[in-house]
Image (cartoon, grey):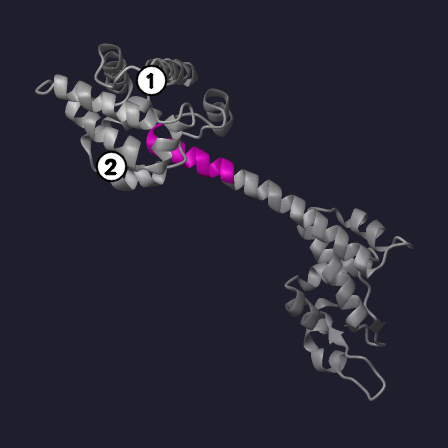
């Protein structure tokens, strides 16, 4: 039967003056991107029957059958079993618009799941690029809404060829979730200390401010890369010039970014010549 259906497409597709277009099973298979065998199976289970069958056994399909096949394939793509598809299509109260709306809603839900999966994969890839061996759930558990991988690609492009970047990556590869929690808590304590000194109205050159800036530098050196006072002063420029760094500090306290940058520079100047 499959060979016979393939051999005579012209006969099955012929039309008369009062006859709708007809397509052979082979033509439908090519149009729909399915196998002839699948169409035979759909016929056998009553899911998509041909419009006509000739005395010689040739199947032919019309516009209504093609439309039904389109709906079947759409539901299949959404993961429905054939039996469930048949039940949906044969609901007495359902019409074409019902099916289109249902398929659109299901497709939207599937796209949201796929987008979430892609985002999760991207975060994992970016974390691995930075040397962070945490999955997306662990990243959220440790860092919350702050995503440490947000600018991973930019960091790799700007500093990927530097010794500091490579050293930071090597160190990060050794850290587990508990270590990252410790790093996070230490960083938070140092930033809170800087904010307190700023709130007290002290100058960036005050001893307390410079001590907090030095704690910040030592934190970087301990956990990420050897950060000399001169390198730390270079970071201070980012805290003021890069809107993202500035917002990180100024969201905690207005003017804190400029204060931290000034304290870092003052500390670096006082320690000039140190490695």
Q: Is residue 8 left or right of residue 259?
A: right
On screen, residue 158 above or below 127:
below
Most extreme residue toward the front is: 201
Q: Is residue 5 left or right of residue 243?
A: right
Residue at 70%, 47% in the rendered image: 106
Question: Looking at the image, which is closer to me, 184 or 91?
Answer: 184
In the image, the segment drawn in magenta is 119-132
Q: What whole-number distance in Å separates the C-alpha atoms at marks 2 and 1?
A: 31 Å
Quadrant showing the N terminus: bottom right
Residue at 55%, 43% in the rendered image: 115
On screen, residue 273 above or below 82:
above
The quadrant holding residue 54 is bottom right
Residue 95, percent from left and from top: 85, 59
Q: Secondary structure at mark 2?
A: helix
Residue 59, percent from left and from top: 79, 71
Q: Main secondary structure of the magenta part?
A: helix
Query: Alpha-carbon neighbours of circle 1 within 10 Å: few (<14), some, or many (≥20)?
Result: many
Question: Looking at the image, which is closer to me, 226 or 236?
Answer: 236
Question: Looking at the image, which is closer to me, 24 or 5?
Answer: 24
| Viewer-nearest of discs 2 and 1 | 1
For marks 2 and 1 on the same chain, the one whose residue lies earlier in the sequence: 2
Question: Looking at the image, which is closer to me, 213 or 51?
Answer: 213
Would residue 121 be counted in the magenta stretch? Answer: yes
- Residue bearing mark 2: 159
The quadrant holding residue 101 is bottom right
Residue 72, percent from left and from top: 74, 56
Most extreme residue toward the left is: 273
Instruction: Report whether residue 228 is seen.
Output: no
- Residue bearing mark 1: 198
Would residue 67 be counted in the magenta stretch? Answer: no
Query: Alpha-carbon neighbours of circle 2 within 10 Å: few (<14), some, or many (≥20)?
Result: few
Most extreme residue toward the right is: 92
């Amino acid at each position: 039967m499959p060979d016979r259906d393939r051999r005579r497409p012209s006969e099955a597709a012929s039309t008369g003056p009062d006859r709708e277009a007809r397509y052979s099973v082979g033509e439908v298979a090519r149009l729909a991107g399915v196998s002839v065998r699948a169409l035979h199976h759909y016929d056998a289970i009553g899911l998509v029957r041909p419009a006509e069958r000739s005395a010689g056994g040739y199947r032919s399909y019309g516009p209504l059958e093609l439309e039904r096949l389109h709906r079947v394939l759409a539901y299949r793509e959404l993961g429905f079993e054939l039996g469930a598809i048949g039940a949906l299509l044969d609901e007495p109260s359902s019409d074409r618009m019902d099916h289109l709306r249902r398929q659109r809603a299901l497709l939207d839900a599937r796209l949201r799941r796929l987008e979430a999966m892609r985002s999760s994969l991207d975060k994992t890839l970016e974390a691995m690029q930075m040397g962070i061996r945490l999955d997306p759930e662990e990243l959220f558990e440790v860092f919350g809404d702050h995503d440490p991988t947000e600018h991973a690609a930019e960091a790799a492009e700007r500093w990927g060829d530097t010794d500091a970047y490579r050293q930071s990556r090597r160190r990060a590869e050794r850290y587990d979730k508990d270590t990252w929690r410790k790093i996070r808590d230490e960083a938070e304590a140092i930033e809170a200390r800087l904010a307190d000194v700023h709130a007290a109205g002290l100058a960036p050159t005050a001893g307390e401010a410079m001590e907090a800036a030095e704690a910040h530098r030592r934190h970087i050196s301990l956990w990420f890369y050897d950060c000399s006072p001169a390198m730390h002063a270079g970071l201070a420029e980012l805290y003021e010039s890069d809107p993202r760094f500035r917002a990180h500090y100024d969201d905690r306290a207005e003017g804190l970014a400029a204060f931290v940058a000034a304290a870092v520079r003052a500390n670096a100047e006082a320690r000039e010549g140190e490695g």
